[in-house]
DNA sequence: AGCGGTTAAGTAAGCGGTTGAGCAACCAGT
DNA sequence: ACTGGTTGCTCAACCGCTTACTTAACCGCT
């Protein structure tokens, strides 16, 4: 029988004021009641310390003032930042963020999204692991979904805050090429290994265009694992130890990381291998996490404007929830290369 | 009303099997029904794709398989880590974490806690801003609360995962004293400025015992603000610029930060002031965030064992929820000083 | 006085489950 | 054959709120 603690209920307020529960319910939400009764009800409610039970309300109305926020992988420090920022943003608008972590697993991601839908979240913000999953379609039918980072190709979403990945990738690779790098390793987050993942395609295209040689290596966000992957990549670097990898693995002069978390792993691996970041090996990140500027050398990275993203995403979700139309439901974030000290001229370049 | 999408309901399963909704409800939860009917019901439910509505269930039973997780301040990177870890931990036990951020505001913290209670979370994990607030008492009566970091002095909690702050503080200050530091600035998170906050007391006591001079300065977790505070502290440092602060402000040779986030701010400020961390100014952190080992020099910090904390906290909460007794409901985490490169011998020390 | 139009409040049927009480059937035990 | 205890399921009352529909009152008009 529920919890023993007795909360005051709507009925009690009704009895105290001599009104029906319906009248009280309306009054408390300021719907077609006279000014006087509204006032009377408010007063009684305050005296009794009444607060509507959100669960009962949700059951009856189908709404919750709660927004689900689904992180693709909370090991990624930047996503932690993003979730925190979104949480603050929503809270400022009197909504609660129900934050969940898919841990980089596409199946879990959909399962959690369904759970959230069942919890009657009014809206769902998602930074998807697998944006092309078909499961999103059904979910987006039941609840307004705003996706962050990638568009959900199979679903009709309520909004999208996208990163112009092509522009970001081009910017970074152009930049590296300009510094004389011709062999670049790209560390992408592990995920569904669809060969046609847009980011991978962009990388290939840019590489072809610029005539540089890239090697794409999937890499976990967690620092320890990222360090491990980076170690393998770096020990093949020209300035590194005797080569242990396969002979056909060309050693990179620069590493382009699809998240700052991963870049931190590269820093760690570089330190182990006694390679100086910036001099022996250039590193570029992709998020601009606050910590990145504290590293030595500060990480050159791509800034997408975290706060703005959180704001826009929250705004789109809230608009959809409230049934408002928005002018543009697809926000494209432009990359800004934060040029700092971790990428310099390639060794041996004229 | 509610959403248009039709989920299969309990009644539909009942009709399909020719049983009462009660029987189906019991069957699905394996309560006193015959093996056969249970089987029959399960099969029907699976065919119809029935899944219990968590909201309705919550209203009727007073339970949700949801645990509230309330972060004192998600700007703190370590708390981000902690929340992520707890979320994973709970998810592994088929419970959902509802993560909220108090943003360092004690009032908001209690308001959010109440909200969570109203949302019928089965349990509440909290890393409190103000552990001595009286409001916790009422909350802890209504829902099992596990506190992390500090004990809730006014409430009967279901468990506590505490850091042995005294030991941690002693360890750090002993260590700094051993390196010859006699003027130390302590950067504590902003919070309710109760003069008798235990951590502050420990600091004073240790300082008295060791004969070192400490200055306690409150500091926000957010990197930008922390950098600002650190800047003011550091520009009074002996190796620093001409002193601009009040003349009676003794310049520290070491800074002890109550969180790694804050320490990052000090790194940033030190870089600006062209002070070498470790040589010109020693810095010690208090969390061991993964990134700390990637900094240059790697941050000497106090490791409390994040994963263990998350596990223990989740375990305590789940035990309380399930009404199980636990042997020890107060876990005390011992500090482990991760001695790395950011704290060295004080300048001018013999 | 009679009439459509508002506005204010009440009635009651849900929302989709859970759960105590009750009842029939069945099994021993005496 | 009668009692008493299980077992297995049904009934119906909730849980606490929302909301379509209805009724009542009151408005100014013709």
Image (cartoon, coloured by chain):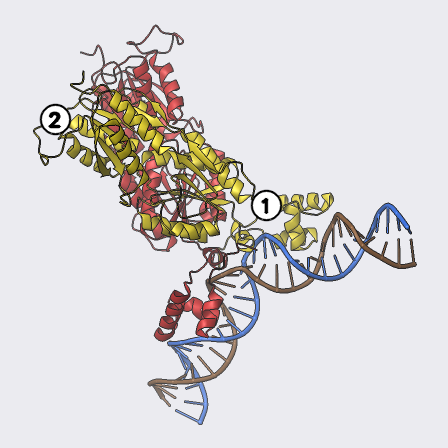
Chain colours: A yellow, B red, C brown, D blue
Looking at this view, is B78 or B162 the one in front? B78
In the rendered structure, the answer to whether residue A337 lies left or right of residue B113 reads left
Image quarter (top left, top right, bottom left or bottom right) of the C terminus of chain A: top left
Residue depicted at x 18% and y 25%: A253
Is B245 placed above or below B63 here?
Answer: above
Looking at this view, is B202 or A135 the one in front? A135
Q: Nearer the viewer, mark 1 or mark 2?
A: 2
Q: Secondary structure at mark 2?
A: loop
Is B172 placed above or below D17 here?
Answer: above
Give the crowd class for mark 1: few <14, some 14-19, many >=20 residues within 10 Å.
few
Where is residue A9? Give x, y as percent. Answer: 59, 52
Q: Secondary structure at mark 1?
A: loop
Residue depicted at x 29% and y 50%: B327
Q: Examine the rendering and report whether any part of residue A114 can be seen.
A: yes
Is B344 placed above or below A140 here?
Answer: above
In the rendered structure, the answer to whether residue A88 lies left or right of residue B216 reads right
- Callouts 1 and 2 in the same chain: yes
Q: Examine the rendering and report whether any part of residue B334 can be seen.
A: no
Number of numbered markers: 2
Looking at this view, is B327 or B40 the one in front? B40
Please say if the residues under marks 1 and 2 sit with CB atoms less than 8 Å apart: no
Q: Which residue is mark 1?
A: A49
Residue D8 quadrant: bottom left
Is B347 placed above or below A226 here?
Answer: above
């Amino acid at each position: 029988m529920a919890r023993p603690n007795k909360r005051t209920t709507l009925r009690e307020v009704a009895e105290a004021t001599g009104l029906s529960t319906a009248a009280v319910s309306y009054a408390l939400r300021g719907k077609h009641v006279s000014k006087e009764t509204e006032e009377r009800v408010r007063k009684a409610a305050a005296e009794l310390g009444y607060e509507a039970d959100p669960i009962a309300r949700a059951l009856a109305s189908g709404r919750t003032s709660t927004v689900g926020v689904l992180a693709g992988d909370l090991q990624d420090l930047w996503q932690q930042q993003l979730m925190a920022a979104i949480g603050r943003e929503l809270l400022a608008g009197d909504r609660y963020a129900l934050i969940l972590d898919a841990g980089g697993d596409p199946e879990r991601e959909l399962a959690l999204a369904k759970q959230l839908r069942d919890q009657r979240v009014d809206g769902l913000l998602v930074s998807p692991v697998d944006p092309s999953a078909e499961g999103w379609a059904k979910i987006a039918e039941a609840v307004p979904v705003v996706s962050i980072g990638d568009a959900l190709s199979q679903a009709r979403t309520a909004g999208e805050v996208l990163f112009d990945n092509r522009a970001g990738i081009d910017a970074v690779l152009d930049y590296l090429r300009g510094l004389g790098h011709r062999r670049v390793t790209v560390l992408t987050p592990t995920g569904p290994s669809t060969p046609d993942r847009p980011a991978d395609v962009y990388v290939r295209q840019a590489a072809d265009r610029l005539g540089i040689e890239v090697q794409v290596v999937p890499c976990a966000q967690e620092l320890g694992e990222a360090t491990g992957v980076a170690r393998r990549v770096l020990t093949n670097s020209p300035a590194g130890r005797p080569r242990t990898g396969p002979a056909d693995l060309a050693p990179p002069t620069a590493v382009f990381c699809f998240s700052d978390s991963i870049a931190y792993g590269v820093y760690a691996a570089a330190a182990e291998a006694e390679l100086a970041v910036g001099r022996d090996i250039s590193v570029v990140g992709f998020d601009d996490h606050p910590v990145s500027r504290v590293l030595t050398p500060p990480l050159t990275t791509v800034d997408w404007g975290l706060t703005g993203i959180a704001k826009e995403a929250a705004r789109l979700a809230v608009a959809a929830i409230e049934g408002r139309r928005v002018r543009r439901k697809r926000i494209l974030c432009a990359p800004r290369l934060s040029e700092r000290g971790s990428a310099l001229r390639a060794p041996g370049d004229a």
